[in-house]
């Protein structure tokens, strides 16, 4: 890096507004289960009740994400974080290995059920 500035700041993840925005964004993301609940309620003629359930689901998701983000933010200064810092370059590889492991396990169980 040559040390030159590029005209804008990057802000801070430590601000509470970013964490709240994460929770709100997570609560607004549509979910297949919410769609099923809403369609089921519409089929039963209880559309308002279905909308209320989906709204409560979204609020619950937002609060859960907010609580997780606040907990992680408060735990970031632990000494364990310093020890795990050296693993940072390998996180993408470890995540890919975990996804591959879980996918292989699901495939093996599916094949075993067919046989």
Image (cartoon, rainbow, N blue to C red):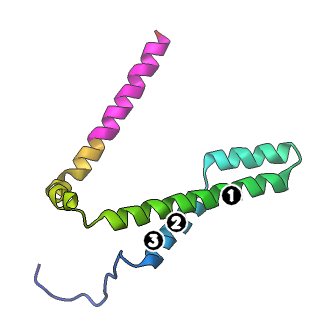
Label 2 – label 1 distance at C-alpha: 14 Å
| Rendering quarter of residue 4 | bottom left
Secondary structure at badge 2 equals helix
Q: Relative to residue 43, is residue 97 drawn left or right?
A: left
Residue identified by numbered label 1: 56
x then y, percent, for residue 28? 60, 63
Residue identified by numbered label 3: 19
Depth check: give the residue in front, 63 or 89.
63
Residue identified by numbered label 2: 23
Q: Relative to residue 73, is residue 66 drawn left or right?
A: right
Please tell me how crowded label 1 is: few (under 14), some (14-19), or many (20+) other residues with Cα within 10 Å: few
Please tell me how crowded label 3 is: few (under 14), some (14-19), or many (20+) other residues with Cα within 10 Å: some
Residue at x 31%, y 81% (from the top left corner): 10
Tell me if residue 3 is in the magenta stretch.
Answer: no
The residue furthest right is 45
x then y, percent, for residue 22? 48, 67
Secondary structure at badge 3 equals helix
């Amino acid at each position: 890096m040559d040390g030159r500035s590029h005209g804008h700041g990057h802000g801070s993840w430590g601000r509470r507004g970013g964490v709240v925005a994460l929770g709100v964004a997570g609560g607004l993301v549509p979910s297949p289960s919410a769609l099923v609940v809403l369609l089921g309620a519409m089929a039963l003629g209880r559309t308002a009740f279905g909308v209320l359930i989906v709204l409560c689901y979204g609020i619950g998701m937002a609060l859960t994400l907010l609580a997780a983000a606040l907990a992680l933010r408060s735990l970031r200064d632990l000494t364990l974080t310093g020890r795990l810092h050296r693993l940072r370059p390998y996180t993408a590889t470890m995540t890919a290995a975990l996804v591959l492991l879980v996918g292989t396990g699901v495939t093996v169980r599916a094949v075993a059920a067919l046989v």
